[in-house]
Amino acid sequence: MTVTRFFKEVGKAFFVGLLIFIVLGVIQYLNGDRIDSGKEFLIKLLYNQLYSVVLYMANAVIIFYVLDRYKNLVFKLKNLWKAVLGNITVTLIAIFLLRFLVNVVFYDQPLMEFLRDQRLDYYLVSFIISMVVASIFYAFYYYKFNQERKVKEQKIIAGTASAQFDALKNQLDPHFLFNSLNVLTSLIEENPDAATKFTTSLSKVYRYVLEQKNKQLVTLEEELRFASLYMSLLKMRFEDSIVYSPPETLENPEAKVVPLSLQLLLENAVKHNQVTPSKKLHITITEKNGVLTIENNFQPKQVVKESSGVGLQNIHKRYGLLTNRPVHVGQEGTHFKVQLPLLTKEAIVRPRADEFISEKRYERAKEKVEKLKGFYIHFTIYLCFVPVFIYLNYISGTSFPWAMFPIGGWGLGVAGHAIEVFNWNPFLGKDWEERKIRELMNKDE
């Protein structure tokens, strides 16, 4: 524990001590136990703060030790029991030393007499208060760890999807450049002047490719503009053998598409079909009802190297990371058609854990069982202690029902545990958690 942290925890200890002093003072006042003078009040306050600070710091040392040692495994049952046992031990030792300090050192009580006079009820109230405060500690850190785990889990999911998306996009660079250089090689042999123009246009096209490298989506209008630029390159080689018909008007020009998807499909159409003056390739792009359709007449080359399928696989996978709406690919008679879903905010979905981190499913189910087991044990212990508190209240000889404070306080802890385990909260439920997680992730970014 650093010096700064030490003084911070001491400050918390004084604050907790004051709260305990006020609660105990109210209980004693209602029970008829009045403070007769300011001196008596000051002495009681000093004793209370002495006990509070020492017990708080002793338990804080144990708690911070187990948190540093076990980290996110501290709330596994076997580790938690070790921590609780450590808190019980250090609390009893601290109470004994505090009583020794007050009775033997301050009031000069003989040591043997002090040892003979030790009784369980001298320790009971301080012990119960100390354990309640320690339980609040654990409940707070359990909630904190759980929220941090959810944030990290969401980051892993988003990071995995982002890594997959980047890997797919990086396939395009060598693929696009390789095919473009093949076209340029052909032009150099057939038409050197066209090759010069092609090189200039290729630089513009490749600049667009680099600009879209870090984007997941671009507008339909922007992608169609690039498609027209790319087709101008192809027409330099094939001249009038390609007839390209983009949509004249757009229903939703701000709709989103995966960048370079049109370039891949246009490239595939030219690569796999005959393109000659006698067998012109007609490529038509239409937009209707949130779908972009790319269609060409099907006239496959007689001799062609077997396709690797990189282009279509890439498009399928990239859309699959962003939306549940499928990409349709198929041949209809003498035409080959690809239909791309146009994406809006409503159509874009956040990648789910079970889609990208399937190995986490068993771990989550196991963790859920551990949480349920921990809650049932906690609830059972609570039910066992309720009659103990009631009995202690009864034998204390007071008419004030002070047992309701530990029973109620602990009951709130059990209720909070249940809310967390069963994921139910009318005020800070799942929607709030999702919003908070996204907010924290955005802040970290």
Image: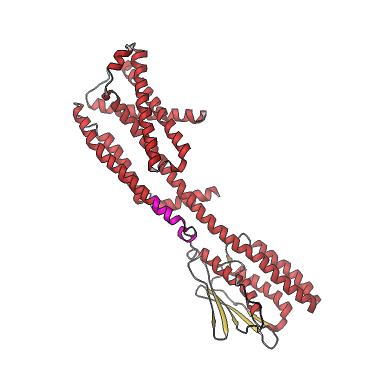
Residue 384, image x, y percentages: 25, 38
Question: Which image quarter: residue 135?
Answer: top left
Residue 346, image x, y percentages: 47, 64
| 203 drawn magenta | no
Main SS class of the magenta portion in the image: helix
Residue at 28% in and 34% down: 406
Question: Which image quarter: residue 237?
Answer: bottom right
What coloring was used for the rendering?
secondary structure
Which residue is at the front of the view, 55 or 110? 110
The correct choice, above or below, for 112 with respect to 403 in the image is above
Q: Left or right? Give the position of 78 relative to 267.
A: left
Outermost residue on the bottom side: it is 278
Residue 274 appears in the picture as rendered: yes
Q: Which span is picked out in magenta?
A: 350-367
Question: Which image quarter: residue 279?
Answer: bottom right
Residue 314, image x, y percentages: 58, 68
Which residue is at the front of the view, 46 or 365? 365
Q: Left or right? Give the position of 48 relative to 165.
A: left
Residue 76, image x, y percentages: 40, 43
The correct choice, above or below, for 430 with respect to 4 in the image is below
Q: How many marks?
A: 0
Q: Left or right? Give the position of 249 relative to 67.
A: right
Residue at 30% in and 37% down: 409
| 354 drawn magenta | yes
Residue 425 appears in the picture as rendered: no
Outermost residue on the front side: it is 78
The correct choice, above or below, for 280 with respect to 131 in the image is below
